[in-house]
Image: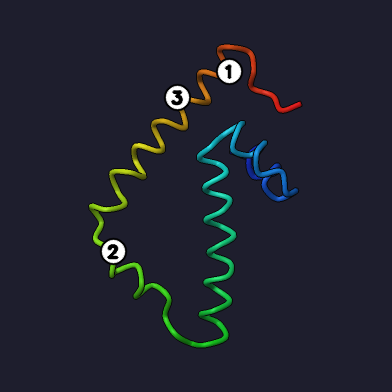
Amino acid sequence: MTTAFAHFVRGNILASAYVQPLGAIAALAVALTFWAALYTAFTARPAHRLLRLIPTRYYLVPLMSLVVLAWMWKMAIHLLGRDGWN
């Protein structure tokens, strides 16, 4: 995850997604959270109300599936010896 964050911060999104897809998505979520926090700070409007509009069943199962697939990808590239980005 830390390698994926490091690649993401430096603008190398493909490397971030290659070494750990879930880390790339987490880094994107952190970046989006920053902008949502700025929105909340400047407008004094709660941003969390928008999340209640989407039922949990629409994002929980795909998110958990993504977690499993990302770690399967990471294990596969590690076992094949291709876990570095050149």
Q: Which residue does the numbered mark 1 point to in the structure image?
A: 78
> The residue under label 3 is which amino acid type?
Met
Q: Is residue 37 left or right of residue 11?
A: left
Q: Tell me the quarter of the picture where residue 32 sits.
A: bottom right
Q: Earlier in the sequence, mark 3 or mark 2?
A: 2
Q: Secondary structure at mark 3?
A: helix
Residue most extreme to the front? 14
Tell me if residue 6 comes above or below residue 32 in the rendering. Answer: above
**Residue 24's spot in the image, x, y percent?**
57, 44
Residue in view at x 23 percent, y 52 percent? 57
Image-based side of 61 in relation to 46, left or right: left
Q: Position of residue 62 (x, y in %)?
A: 33, 43
Q: Which residue is mark 3?
A: 72
Q: Secondary structure at mark 1?
A: helix
Distance (Cα) linking label 3 and label 2: 28 Å
For marks 1 and 3 on the same chain, the one whose residue lies earlier in the sequence: 3
Q: Amino acid at mark 2?
A: Ile
How far across and down, in percent of the image, does residue 13 sit?
66, 44
* Residue drawn at 41 percent across, 30 percent down: 69
What's under tag 1, amino acid-wise?
Answer: His
User: Do callouts 3 and 2 mark residues in contact (Cβ within 8 Å)?
Assistant: no
Q: Which residue is mark 2?
A: 54
Quarter of the image for the N terminus: give it: top right
Farthest residue toward the top?
80
> Crowdedness of circle 1 by 10 Å Cα count: few (<14), some, many (20+)?
few
Q: Could you say where residue 34 lies in the image, as x and y percent from the top left?
A: 58, 67
